[in-house]
Structure formats: C-alpha cells, structure tokens
Amino acid sequence: MSQGFHPYGLIATDLDGTLLGSDHQVSPRNREALAAATAAGAAHIVVTGRPASRTLHVFEALGYEGLAVCGQGSEVYHAGERRLLTSVTLDRSSAQLALAKIEAETGPLRLGFVRDGLDGAYLAGPGFQLAWDKPIDGRMTSRDELWAEPLAKIFVQHGDPGVGEDELAAIARAAAGDLVGIVVSGIGIVELLPLGLTKATGLSLAARRLGFKAADTIAFGDMPNDIPMFGWAAYGVAMANAHDELKAVADEVTASNDEDGIAEVLERLLAGPAA
C-alpha cells in the first residue's frame, strides 16, 4: 500500500500515558497532528491495554471510527461499526494454576478481572485498587466468581505497598511464565493474559487488515507492555514519562504525554527532511 505520510503509513498509539494526557484527554495539538498525518495519507490505529469494554467511551469522545487493538492484543475492535472482529480469552484452567503458583511465592494477592466481550464487566476483589477514568462494575466477594465465566484478563496486586509492579511481575514470570502472559501495563498494574499474546500480535493482525506491514509502522508507547509492539514496528517512540525498560529499546524518546510528545514527532515528519 502507498504510504502517503512519509516514511510511515501506519501510526500506532497507546492510549494511557501516551496519547491521553493526565486529564485522560487528547490535547488539541495532538489531535491536529494526527489529523494532518491522516490527511497526508497515513492511518492511525489505537493499540491499548484496555479491553474494548473499557475503551468505548474514549473512542466516542475522540470521534474515533477506525480499527483498534484492545486488551493487550486480545481484541481487534472496529470502532465505526462498534463490533469486535477478534477476541481471545484467557484459559481459565491455566490461569487458575498460574495464580496458585504465583501465590505460593507471594502469599494471597489482591485481584481484579475483566470479563470477555464488549459488555465484559470489570470487577475487583477485596483491597484491590486500580486508577481508571471509569469506575469498576462491582466487587468480587468469592474467588469462585473469577472462574465462573470467560475472562479477558486478570489483574494482580501485592498487599505490601513495598512490592511494586516490576518486582511482582518478575516473581510471577518465574513462577508461572510458562502458563500465562505477564505484563506491567501501568503503575501498580500487573496483568495475567493468554500465553503468547502481546500488543504486537494484535497490531500485526489489524495492520494486515488495513494493508500495512511492520516496515510501514511507527509506534508510540510508555510502558513495558509496549515493548513487543516496538519490536514489531519499524520505529518505536517512547514518551518522556515512559518506563525505563521501554526507553531502553526505543528508537527515540519524545516529550511526555502532557507535553504533546506524539505531535512533536509527527510535526517533524510532516515537515520533511531538514534542508
């Protein structure tokens, strides 16, 4: 496919900490830069760790109607048609065994989870806290509820505030990395996912539907869950507020999400090579 927007035809952006500012909004400058890039022939695709059920209101506010990769790559969602094109669920037997192995090392963890599908509820167990711009749907009173219906993902959180997300993820990978995927997707956020699933798998599938390849793609992100996406795309741009692990593999570090880092890069590309 002709790229139009030189040298990239596909612009992949994470949401939280990347395209969205701390106020959970897209700045006017970022909006204008993306509009200019798409007018020049590029396609913009959102690639987020949020499940589609927790992203619909964001797309509505943005007026976004394209394809989106949600749930760390488990879902390809068509915002314009408001339907899921693909959805991969977490194997509950593997997840249950994985959780048991992790808790054998950590003790009981605080849990949250998201059900599969566009109506997938987000529930949290005792003590679990997660910052979202939309509230949880309810509280889990028994762990039996966790395994009762298909799952998109499980969130795990240590009860000791001294054990951060990086340490917990490392423990989890050592104990159960052969059973489930384990990613850090935000401050205090460790997720258990279908084994082998990453943002890269979802992005590659969506890009193929749009007629693009990895060589056509520039990706923007801020957290370790964006590392596979950077590995797949031709060029990876980390925000100034990004996790050090992502900065270490990025081709470039731009300004923060609150300082229009995406626009800074796109405006430079739109201007073309310096004379």
Image (cartoon, rainbow, N blue to C red):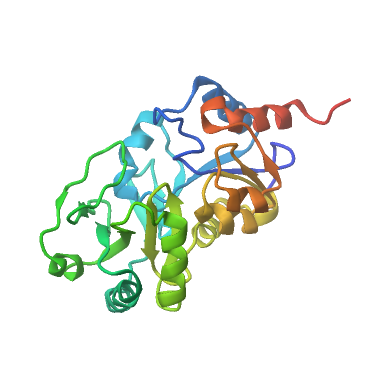
Q: Nearer the viewer, residue 255 or 188?
A: 188
Reply above or below: 180 against 73: below
Q: Is residue 238 left or right of residue 102?
A: right
Residue 207 visible to an observer of this rendering? no
The residue at the point 19 percent across, 70 percent down is: 147
Residue 140 is situated, as x and y percent measured from the top left of the image, at 14, 57
Residue 200 is situated, as x and y percent measured from the top left of the image, at 54, 59
The residue at the point 52 percent across, 62 percent down is: 201
Residue 165 visible to an observer of this rendering? yes
Residue 224 is situated, as x and y percent measured from the top left of the image, at 53, 54
Reply above or below: 237 against 267: below
Q: Nearer the viewer, residue 166 or 214?
A: 166
The residue at the point 38 percent across, 50 percent down is: 188
Q: Nearer the viewer, residue 173 or 180?
A: 173
Q: Nearer the viewer, residue 107 or 154?
A: 107
Residue lying furthest right: 275
Q: Is residue 121 left or right of residue 270?
A: left
The residue at the point 22 percent across, 40 percent down is: 135
Q: For the image shown, how many numbered marks are present on the structure?
A: 0
Q: Which of the 4 quarters of the picture holds residue 171?
A: bottom left
Reply above or below: 252 against 274: below
Q: Which of the 4 quarters of the picture holds residue 275?
A: top right
